[in-house]
Image: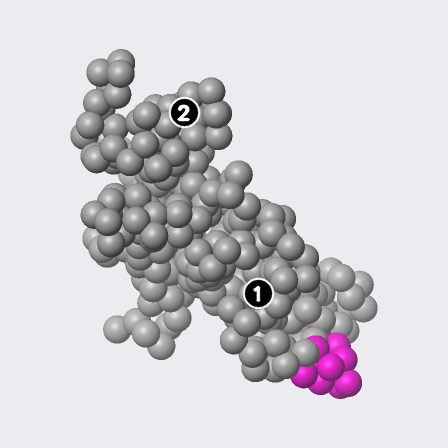
Amino acid sequence: MSATASPSPVAVETPLHRLARKFAANRVALGGLIVFAAIALVAIAAPLAAPQNPYDLASLDIMDGSLEPGTPNADGRPYLLGTDEQGRDMLSAILYGLRISIGVGVGSTVLALSIGLAMGLFAAYSGGWRDTLVMRLVDLQLGFPPILIALILLAILGRGVDKVIIALVAVQWAYYARTVRGSALVERRKEYIEAARCLALPYTRIVFGHLMPNCLPPLIVVATMQVAHAIALEATLSFLGVGVPVTEPSLGMLIANGFDFMMSGKYWVSFFPGITLLVTVVSINLVGDHLRDILNPRLQK
């Protein structure tokens, strides 16, 4: 008598696998993710990938200043993107500038997300006057243009990478607080939260163990968009001369350095950093836009 074949186990698709499958189905968003990953990888490996260290004064030659793209130096190595007036290789300056721009954008977003997440959860779960107080602070902060708040803070704190991060955190945290509070208010009324309260679980366990995980999907979308916004805002502040110092130029500072030379025909000093900034911001926005479509059921067909 033949043995009965046992049924093959059914593979269970986890939420992470489902998210990856839906994301990979969109070629535009996948292309944006690949482009940004490549940009971030090159920025991290800038000391190894850059032909020149733009911060090393010993490697600069004033005789190589304002060379057009493709012009070779004394060693025969071409400057692929040209040089600025100080003789810095623009390709190297862009790679090092990317490190600062992406670092400021990601760092400020992580800090602002942490603060906004804690404030939003506290307001939604506590309710009452605490909720009112937090939301009035959020409304007050969102009532002013972000660039204005950042300019005022940097005028007080001064220039520096850490100062720019502080200013961007002060600008961004309210977006996360409002988003988290809206999601937490919905989750707070559900049965699993009421069950946790009936079991007399600790406050921190209910908020961070049960409430917070269900508020993360919309927060991921906002955080992705805010990374691009932070990079663009930092570039604007540096272009205006109140952002990062000249000794640590970001993409915005590189654009500002070459702006005065645009009318004299030296377009490459500002053009290539501007294109790099544009591609970086657009690639992040493509990723965030598709994540919004995936994580928001109302936008799905």
Pick the residue in front: 160 or 1: 160
Q: How many marks?
A: 2
At 76% across and 80% down in the image, what residue appears? 130
At 68% across and 69% down in the image, what residue appears? 119
Q: Is residue 79 above or below residue 237?
A: above
Q: Kindly tell me whether residue 280 is visible in this rendering.
A: no
Is most of the magenta stretch helix, strand or loop? helix
Residue 257 rendering spot, x and y as whole percentages: 39, 47
Residue 133 counted in the magenta span? yes
Residue beneath disc 2: 60
At 73% across and 81% down in the image, what residue appears? 133
Residue 193 rendering spot, x and y as whole percentages: 67, 72
Disc 1 marks which amino acid? Ala
Q: Is residue 36 above or below residue 187?
A: above
Residue 126 counted in the magenta span? yes
Structural distance between the alpha carbons of marks 1 and 2: 34 Å
Label 1: which secondary element: helix
In magenta, the rendered stretch is 125-136
Task: Determine whether label 1 and label 2 are within 8 Å by CB.
Answer: no
Place residue 112 in its image quadrant: bottom right
Q: Is residue 28 above or below residue 212?
A: above
Q: In which quadrant will I find the C terminus? A: bottom left
Q: Residue furthest top?
A: 75
Residue 226 rendering spot, x and y as whole percentages: 47, 61
Label 2: which secondary element: loop
Residue beneath disc 1: 150
